[in-house]
Image: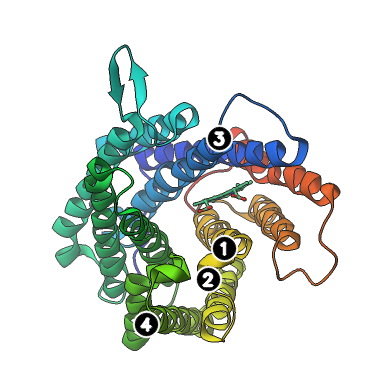
């Protein structure tokens, strides 16, 4: 096994804080579901609620948890810890940013005569903390990162830095207003794709790999195939009308390449994993493989264009973000019955989304399904909060 460090007090606090953010972000997501199911009017634009949820989850849950866990598992077994101040800034800014989306969304806030783009300013400050982590990683990688893990963690860190190009480009387009909307959409999807499929997925795979016996090499071709798809696959999220035929073919090839690479990485892990690793990581890795296979089928076979399947996209995203990313973090921080309970409730949320997609083979669901989905969505934040209060969140 590669070196595995124990949590310093600052790491343990940051992991618990990330769990608290997960609970809040999950409740914000659940609020969206109650608004849809019961028509609640909470005085907030549902689009802003969705943005608050996704930003809290991305910036305040998965990113700081990965900062800490990669520091402990991949970078010299924690011998060169991530600076505590960096963790505090990452979490603090993420919480303020996520909550600021509730009243303002992407609209500028009115302070007297001034219109201030609060959430854009805060989001760009969050990116500064990511650069600081990448700089910290760069300074430690040569001497401290196990050679087996290096391709994965190098790629994850590179994708984190690269994703911000998309975000900066969106900001640079703001003065152009409505002009260049398609380009703005392309930059936004580049950011989302590279951040979630590059940084999160490869970062989490690094943690899973750190549980394998020594010298299980990461298959280079699979990482390259996935990497190509991660970089180009954002084209799949643009409306089909925005791309010429050549662009649509390229996007489909990238999607298939991405899916094949991910399935091959998951398979290599599975073949080599000892029973102890499979008991915690087996489920998230299986869900990752399912995501990769879905992707190959959905974009490789002739059929509807990916961006036109909005409900399937929400299901796919949660299969990745809840099924792999969040359960992967849980595999490193929860154990025993708490891990099983967290897995069960997260899977229930993913399953509750199926009836709203074109994959549902029966009659379209009635209001009861929306109401059930709303109530189920409260469970993961409640289990996370209970684990936190019960002192069950610790690096395992
Ligand atoms: C804790 C359980 C979760 C619940 C109850 C939940 C709920 C929701 C809901 C209701 C939506 C809006 C869906 C729609 O527009 O129809 C949503 C969207 C989204 N969620 Fe979650 N979610 C959860 C976990 C997560 C996690 C762990 C992440 C990321 C790490 C995440 C990231 C996102 C993103 C990025 C979107 C926006 C999708 C889009 O582009 O439309 N969610 N979620």
Residues 241 and 274: in front is 241
Which residue is depicted at the point 43% across and 48% down?
58
Q: Which of labels 4 and 1 is toward the front?
A: 4
**First in sequence: mark 2 or mark 3?**
3
Q: Residue 220 in the image: x percent, y percent? A: 31, 85
Packing grade of label 3 (10 A; few <14, some 14-19, many >=20) is many
If you read the primary sequence from the N terminus, does the residue marked by circle 1 or circle 2 appear first? 2
- Find out whether the residues at labels 3 and 4 contact each other: C-beta distance under 8 Å: no
Q: CA distance from mark 3 to mark 4?
A: 39 Å
Q: Position of residue 240 (x, y in %)?
A: 46, 71
The residue lying toward the viewer, choosing from 219 and 306, is 306
Marks 1 and 2: which is nearer the front?
Answer: 2
The residue labelled by disc 4 is 250
Res 125 seen here:
yes
Q: CA distance from mark 2 to mark 4?
A: 13 Å
Name the residue beneath numbered marker 1. Answer: 313
Which of these two is toward me, 77 or 136? Answer: 136
3 or 4: mark nearer the eye: 4
Q: Which mark is residue 24?
A: 3
Q: Residue at x 59, y 70 (%)?
A: 287
- Residue in view at x 31 percent, y 64 percent: 156
- Confirm or reject: label 4 Cβ below 8 Å from ligand 1: no
Q: Residue 38, located in which quarter of the rendered image?
A: top right
Mark 1 closeness class: few <14, some 14–19, many ≥20 residues within 10 Å: some
**Residue 208 appears in the figure:** no
Q: Is mark 1 within 8 Å of ligand 1?
A: yes
Instruction: Identify the secondary structure beneath mark 2.
Output: helix
Q: Quick one: label 3 or label 1, which is nearer the N terminus?
A: 3
Residue underneath mark 2: 306
The image's colour scheme reads rainbow
Q: Report if the beta carbon of the residue with label 2 is closer than 8 angstroms to ligand 1.
A: no
Q: Splitting the image into 4 quarters, where does residue 202 fall?
A: bottom left
């Amino acid at each position: 096994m590669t070196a595995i460090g124990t949590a310093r007090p600052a790491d343990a606090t940051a992991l618990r804080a990330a769990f608290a953010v997960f609970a809040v972000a999950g409740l914000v997501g659940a609020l969206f579901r109650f608004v849809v199911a019961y028509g609640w009017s909470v005085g907030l634009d549902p689009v802003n609620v969705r943005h608050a949820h996704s930003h809290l989850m991305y910036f305040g849950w998965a990113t700081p948890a990965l900062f800490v866990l990669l520091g402990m598992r991949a970078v010299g077994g924690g011998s060169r810890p991530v600076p505590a101040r960096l963790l505090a800034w990452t979490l603090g800014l993420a919480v303020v940013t996520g909550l600021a989306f509730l009243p303002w969304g992407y609209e500028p806030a009115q302070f007297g005569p001034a219109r201030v783009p609060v959430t854009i300013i805060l989001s760009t400050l969050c990116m500064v903390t990511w650069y600081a982590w990448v700089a910290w990683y760069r300074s430690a990688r040569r001497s401290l990162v196990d050679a087996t893990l290096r391709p994965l963690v190098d790629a994850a860190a590179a994708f984190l830095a690269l994703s911000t190009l998309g975000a900066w480009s969106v900001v640079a387009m703001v003065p152009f207003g409505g002009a260049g909307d398609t380009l703005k959409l392309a930059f936004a999807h580049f950011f989302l794709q590279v951040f979630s499929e590059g940084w999160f997925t490869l970062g989490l795979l690094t943690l899973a790999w750190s549980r394998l016996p020594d010298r299980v090499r990461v298959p280079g071709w699979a990482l390259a195939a996935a990497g190509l798809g991660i970089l180009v696959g954002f084209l799949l999220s643009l409306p089909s009308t925005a791309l010429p035929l050549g662009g649509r073919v390229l996007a489909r090839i990238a999607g298939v390449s991405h899916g094949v690479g991910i399935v091959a990485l998951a398979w290599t892990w599975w073949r080599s994993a000892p029973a102890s690793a499979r008991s915690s990581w087996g489920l998230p890795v299986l869900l990752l493989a399912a995501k990769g296979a879905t992707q190959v089928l959905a974009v490789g076979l002739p059929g509807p264009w990916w961006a036109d399947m909005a409900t399937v996209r929400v299901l796919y995203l949660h299969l990745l973000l809840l099924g792999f990313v969040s359960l992967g973090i849980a595999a490193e921080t929860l154990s025993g019955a708490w891990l099983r309970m967290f897995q069960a409730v997260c899977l229930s949320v993913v399953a509750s989304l199926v009836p709203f997609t074109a994959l549902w083979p029966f009659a379209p669901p009635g209001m009861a399904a929306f109401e059930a989905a709303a109530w189920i969505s409260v469970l993961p934040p409640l289990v996370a909060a209970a684990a936190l209060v019960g002192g069950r969140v610790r690096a395992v």
